[in-house]
């Protein structure tokens, strides 16, 4: 029960990867602050902050549902204050909230570009900024951001310039924070999947049921987060992890059970060769 009594502040936790990480930590008695916009369920997306809070409690943790749009700094401040008031501090920050836009430059609407950067870059930055004062006080503080390894070969950037630079920015912040907060013992790492992950975004925006069947379940990233977050924050920092490498380090080599369609073909992620 390495996470019993620890408080994890997880953005975008009303479904998908954020929910999976929340439930994985809840199984070990963690306090989970479920930070997202979804108070009412969208049938296409599924999940709300309240439904996840209930699942967290059922799993053995303590859930706090907090409605928060991370584009709004006042809402971030309120969410952080609620977390600290209820649970006494913040030990873990998971920057999971993200917007996707797989379009080329000419097809990217300005409002979509702004949305992607307001959430992925500005939102991630501000959430981290306001959690850091409390992470400094934690025993083994971690920042974990869902963003890819950085490779500036144009082949990775050219297809979706607007979106890619936002995700690479998240990874650059990870590298910067690892050094900026090294003396405070705060770890900063990123995590990214080798394959597509079966989430509502994959189904509704990328490839429907076909791509879902070629994906892995969000639980693969939850198990990776569980492993990373129990490492020493003074030693395990400044990494842009891929999920398969994390599981290999944890001694897990059979990944077939993570597949939506065990034994079937898998689709590589956009930023993985």
Image: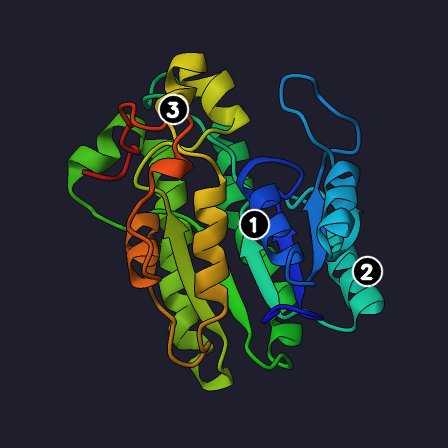
Residue that appears at 44% across and 67% down: 188
Residue that appears at 41% across and 62% down: 189
Residue that appears at 21% across and 48% down: 151
Q: Secondary structure at mark 2?
A: helix
Q: Which residue is mark 1?
A: 21
Mark 2 crowd level (few <14, some 14–19, many ≥20, 10 Å Cα): some
Label 2, label 3: how far apart the Cα atoms are: 40 Å
Q: Position of residue 17 (x, y in %)?
A: 53, 41
Q: Secondary structure at mark 3?
A: loop
- Closer to the camera, 26 or 8? 26
Residue that appears at 46% across and 30% down: 100
Reply above or below: 127 against 273. Answer: below
The answer to whether the residues at label 1 and label 3 have Cβ atoms under 8 Å apart is no
Mark 2 or 3: in front is: 3
Q: Earlier in the sequence, mark 2 or mark 3?
A: 2
Q: Which numbered circle lies on residue 261? A: 3
Q: Quadrant of residue 126?
A: bottom right
Q: Secondary structure at mark 1?
A: helix
Q: Which numbered circle lies on residue 82? A: 2
Locate the N terminus by quadrant: bottom right
Residue lying at the far bottom of the rendered structure: 183
Q: Which numbered circle lies on residue 123? A: none
């Amino acid at each position: 029960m390495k996470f019993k009594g620890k408080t994890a502040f997880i953005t975008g936790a009303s479904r998908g990867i954020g929910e999976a990480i929340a439930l994985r930590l809840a199984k070990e008695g963690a306090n989970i602050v479920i930070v997202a916009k979804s108070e009412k369920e969208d049938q296409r997306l599924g999940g709300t902050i309240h439904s996840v809070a209930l699942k967290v409690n059922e799993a053995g943790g303590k859930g706090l549902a907090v409605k928060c749009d991370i584009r709004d700094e006042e809402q971030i401040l309120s969410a952080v204050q609620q977390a600290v008031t209820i649970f006494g501090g913040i030990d873990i920050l998971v920057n999971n909230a993200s917007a996707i836009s797989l379009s080329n430059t000419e097809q990217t609407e300005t409002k979509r570009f702004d949305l992607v950067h307001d959430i992925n870059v500005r939102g991630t930055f501000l959430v981290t900024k306001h959690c850091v004062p409390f992470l400094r006080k934690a025993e083994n503080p971690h920042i974990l951001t869902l963003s890819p390894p950085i490779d500036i070969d144009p082949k990775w950037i050219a297809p979706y310039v607007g979106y890619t630079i936002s995700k690479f920015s998240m990874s650059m912040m990870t590298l910067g924070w690892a050094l900026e907060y090294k003396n405070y013992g705060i770890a900063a790492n990123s995590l990214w999947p080798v394959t597509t992950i079966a989430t509502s975004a994959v189904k509704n925006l990328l490839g429907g049921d076909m791509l879902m069947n070629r994906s892995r379940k969000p639980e693969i990233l939850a198990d990776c987060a569980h492993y990373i977050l129990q490492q020493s924050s003074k030693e395990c920092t400044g990494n842009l992890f891929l999920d398969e490498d994390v599981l290999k380090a944890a001694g897990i080599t059979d990944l077939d059970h993570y597949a939506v369609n065990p034994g079937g073909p898998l689709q590589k992620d956009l930023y993985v060769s």
